[in-house]
Image (cartoon, rainbow, N blue to C red):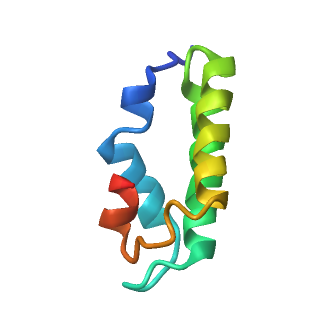
Amino acid sequence: MTTKRGLTHIFGGPVLSGLLSSVSFTSDLSQQAKQQTISKLFAFSVEEYIFEDVAKKVSAQLQSEFDAGKFSQCQDSESFAKG
């Protein structure tokens, strides 16, 4: 049986760092790498967070912010993780 976790645990540093390290990129973080990471965060949060509807809302907000260009100035994984 899998235990679902809270959003602070899901979107915490270790999880985000792991997702970022699984995306292949150079020191200059591409828009494609950022989008892949956001997509992986969505899938992971819906699977792991106890309140699936909340996970979907948070992930939709993150995608909306990405689409609006909020992360365009982030050039490396550290600045992207801090958002």
Q: Nearer the viewer, residue 68 or 39?
A: 68
* Quadrant in the picture for residue 30: bottom right
Instruction: Establish if 79 lies above or below 13.
Output: below
Instruction: Establish if 17 lies above or below 76.
Output: above
Count of numbered tags: 0
Relative to 78, 7 lies left or right: right
Check the picture and name the quadrant holding the N terminus: top right
* Quadrant in the picture for residue 46: top right
Residue located 63% across and 63% down the image = 35
Relative to 53, 28 lies left or right: left
* Quadrant in the picture for residue 51: top right
| Whole-percent x, y for residue 22 in the image | 49, 64
Relative to 7, 76 lies left or right: left
Relative to 32, 15 lies left or right: left
| Whole-percent x, y for residue 48 in the image | 56, 27
Residue located 48% across and 80% down the image = 25
Instruction: Establish if 52 lies above or below 43.
Output: above
| Whole-percent x, y for residue 28 in the image | 42, 85
Check the picture and name the quadrant holding the C terminus: bottom left
Residue located 40% across and 77% down the image = 75
Residue located 37% across and 29% down the image = 9
